[in-house]
Amino acid sequence: MNIVMALEMAADCHPDRIAVTSGTKSLTYGDLLRAARTAGAVVRDSGCRYLGLLDINSPAAPVAIFAAAYAGVPYVPMNYRLTRPELEALLARIEPAFLVAAPAYVEALTMPAGNRVVSAEDFLALAQGNTAPATEAPGDPSTVAVQLFTSGTTGTPKAAVLRHENLMSYILGTVDFAGADDADAALVAVPPYHIAGISAVLSSTYACRRMVQLPNFDGATWLTLCRDEGVTNAFVVPTMLSRVMEHLDAIGESGALPAMKAIAYGGGKMPPQVIEKAMAIWPAVDFTNAYGLTETSSTICLLGPEDHRDAFTSADPEVRRRLHSVGKPIGTVEIEIRDAGGKALSAGELGDVFVRGGQVSGEYLGVGSLLDADGWFPTRDRGFVDRYGFLYLDGRADDVIVRGGENISPGEIEDVLREHPAVSDVAVVAMADEQWGEAVAAVVVPREGANVAAADLQDWVRQRLRSSRVPAAIRFRNELPYNEMGKVLRRVLKEDFRDEAQPA
Amino acid sequence: MKTLKAGTRLKSAACDTEVMVIRTRPEPVLLCCGGMEMIAMDGQKAAAEPDAAFAQGALVGKRYVDEQDTTELLCTKGGKGSLSLDGALLVVKQAKALPSSD
């Protein structure tokens, strides 16, 4: 069981179908297989122990994923937005690496001597050169296919390890082989170092679907590319969909996407206003919410198109709220909600989300496996499953505010504040408090032109939630800090309240 | 008779068919394609055509299971022979299609 099996099957059945389009360049599945086998031989013969990528998306990324497998080394795509010291530390951890990198990203770096650096163009030239191709991928199903560094918000980045058996378990469990039509095209807008960037390549390949790469996202380009390339499927993170909506509002166009069949989203919490607006603009499009983690080889739960339509058209609040749910576990994984003592909870009870299944790696290099004796992985997400089996997430366990022994989730306070007419965006975090240990603090982005006092917002929360939920301090900002995947950087906001002495 | 293992790949001795074992039972089984026992990927093919009773073909990308649902194979390359386990033909497993999530 090796990821190259997906490519070999695709190239065998649809050798002439386009695998990837990037600007004016494209590779067929036959080309992609040949390139991966040739580059795999080059990397293998180099003696390097990793194949790294430090660049925006390009055809070099799918070639490198499979080339690493033919070379028998882990593929390690890295975040090109990291600072110089952060990158130097990661590059030292994968020495000796065969590194595909844009010159602009490595010029200023001190490169470990054992790393061999080539540009994406040179890598593709090598892949299409005269080296005798590797014909078989070495190793066994437990060989490491991909190593992804976590964002490291709480310390040194951890290296999450995904084995061939994890990734193939996900692909075989979720994708129909050659299920794509000739005209199908999936727009890949997520960066190559994100798990969604990896699963996009593997899923598209096994479905024999054409990938269209968008290396630098903005709302206008996304729409243009969807139209010009006849894109039928797209995956977006919530901020991307927000930006597309903002762009449509700003220029007042209809947003018509005649070829689009399905849009999937994930990677963070989707604001209900955004998804409802998107469903109204594109009523014929199938929307799917995908919940997954790096450590679970991508998607573990899905809220499918039917669920979206049921919720969108229902008057029943319990059905309607499914637009806030991440859906039900896919057939090959199980979900369990547990309390702090490890006891399984029943429907409706909030606790820690655990997951089990063949695609769950739950393992970090140098740390080992975080799976318990029965194979369950703690996602560190909080949530509950309702009586219909839908999973609702309630933030990260690390974000829970512990006020005088009471656990408070930022999510419910954020949801209430977001309904206030003067609030455009909001994040709730913990701040230190002498009396309670921790107290609730909120950072609010007011709507343009709106003027609102902290006291009004505190009253607004007091009227709707228990008094312990009322923010003790509120700060205003012009915008919230997000990472490029649309996650609020709560640690930055917490800093704001570090020296908070006065109540708001 | 062979003891199969999840992840193992085998090929037909009588046609182009190739399979990967998804799951199986611990006891040894007789896995055939075209009526002949399937062989290792580097094994030598027989100079024979599939047995007419086992020649409905195997389709690439399809999952094949036995009646007791103890063994599941993925056909990684199609061929003229039919897959069988201990003499009984395997059937295509109808998987519920999931919406594309990436």
Image (tube, rainbow, N blue to C red):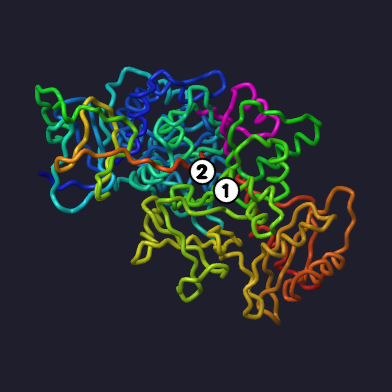
Pick the quarter of the image with the C terminus of chain A: bottom right
Query: Residue A97, image x and y in percent?
Result: 38, 39
Q: Nearer the viewer, residue A234 or A78?
A: A234
Q: Which chain letter matches label 1?
A: A
Question: Is the residue A317 above or below the residue A228 in the image?
Answer: below
Kind of residue at disc 2: His
Asked if residue A220 is positioned above or below residue A396 in the image, the reply reads above
Please tell me which of labels 1 and 2 falls first in the chain.
2
Question: Which numbered tag is attached to residue A194?
Answer: 2
Magenta stretch contains residue A79: no
* Residue type beneath disc 1: Gly
Residue A382 in view (yes/no): no
Q: Which mark is residue A267?
A: 1
Image: magenta residue range:
A211-236
Instruction: Tell me the residue at 79%/54% (across/down).
Output: A445
Instruction: State yes or no: discs 1 and 2 in contact (Cβ < 8 Å).
Output: yes
Which residue is the extreme one toward the front? B53
One can see residue A406 in this view: yes
Residue A232 lies in the magenta-colored region: yes
The residue located at (46%, 33%) in the rendering is A204
Query: Which label sits in the foreground, 1 or 2?
Result: 1
Q: What label sits on residue A71 in the rendered view?
A: none
